[in-house]
Structures are given as structure tokens and as C-alpha cells.
Amino acid sequence: MPLTKRDQFRRVTLLCCHFVRNLAYDQAGRTPSLKTASQFWITVHNNFLDHCVLEWCKLFIDTKGRPPGEHRWDNVVADKARFEGELFQLIDKTKFETLLNAMRKARDKFIAHLDDLPTEDTPHMNIAKNAVHFYHRYILRNEAQPEDLTGLPTDLIDYYSACYDEAKAVYARRVI
């Protein structure tokens, strides 16, 4: 059953929040004073980054599913040319296309399948974060009605900061 536009906006917003939260949790733990070599924390950080890649792909890459790519930006926004134009004012088109390829490769060759790659090349998360912030803001300003997103974060910068601070507090108490 196809999603209503309201449900689609809510789900896109949730995906944006999941990406930002996982990125904040990962980056908070990469503070030099919190770095640790235990397998537990290495796994935790890898899981955060893998989750970021998967959520980002849902927002910007996926063309498969039921229906195909229902969270992908060009299946959500009404004015595709405006969205793309504004996105490429914020992020250089070539850098964005490089990021698309890196995210797809990370997902397809390392996260979803373990191909013959010896290590995962972590995509450039700052550009990915900027794209997610843009998509989230665009939905809030141009697509969704305020009541569509009740209870969801409306400012991803503040949300990232709150998640980052929460993670730092947890890392400071770590026992492993």
C-alpha cells in the first residue's frame, strides 16, 4: 500500500534523524581522549557508520523496494529541479556524485555483501551530513505541513549536538 505524502515526509524526516544520530554517536567517540582499541568499541563505531551509509542510501540512492525508492528525494519532493538546483548550490555536483558512488560502493561491496575488498573505504561523512541537513530542511520548508512532523526534530544541527553530547557522556562512563 503506497504511503500518504504525510507518512512519506515523516519517514524521510526519521531517516534524516537516524543518519544524524548515528553520525553524532560515532563522531563523539572519535574524540582522542575517548579512543579505545577494544573490539567492542570498534564494532560500535563501525555499526554507527554502517547505519549512516544505509540510511543515506535510502534518501539519495535507492531505486528498489516497494514502491521503488519511496524515500529517495526525487520520489518525495514536488519540484525536482528546484531541489536539485538548491542542493548543488550547497554541495558541488561533482563532489556529490563522487559521494553517491562511494556510498553505493560501501553499501554494496562491504556492508550488504562482503566482496573481495580488504577494508571499507568510509565515505566523506561531512558532505553526506550536509546533504541530509539540506533534504531535511527542504522537506520542512517546502513540502510538509507543520502538523505532519509533530514530535520530530525540526533542527538537525541542534539534534546532532544533543546526540553528540549524549554519546560523550556515555563514552566517559565506559567500562570496557
Image: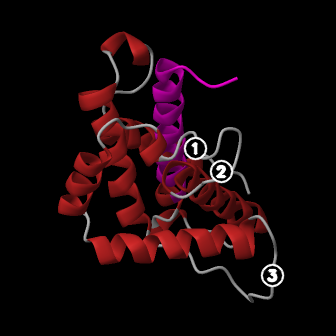
The answer to whether one can see residue 111 in this image is yes
Q: Residue placed at 63% from the left, 55% from the top?
A: 54
Q: Main secondary structure of the magenta part?
A: helix
User: Which quadrant of the figure contains the C terminus?
Assistant: bottom right
Q: Residue placed at 66% from the left, 79% from the top?
A: 120
Q: Which mark is residue 115?
A: 3
First in sequence, mark 3 or 1: give its number.
3
Image spot of residue 109 (x, y percent): 72, 76
Residue indicated by mark 2: 174
Comparing 141 with 46, the one in front is: 141
Q: Crowding near pointer 1: few (<14 within 10 Å), some, many (20+)?
A: some
In the rendered structure, are the residues bearing label 3 and label 1 in contact, judged by CB atoms less than 8 Å apart? no
Image spot of residue 45 (x, y percent): 63, 61
Comparing 50 with 170, the one in front is: 50
Q: Residue placed at 30% from the left, 47% from the top?
A: 134
Residue type, label 3: Asp
Q: Is residue 100 above or below residue 148?
A: below
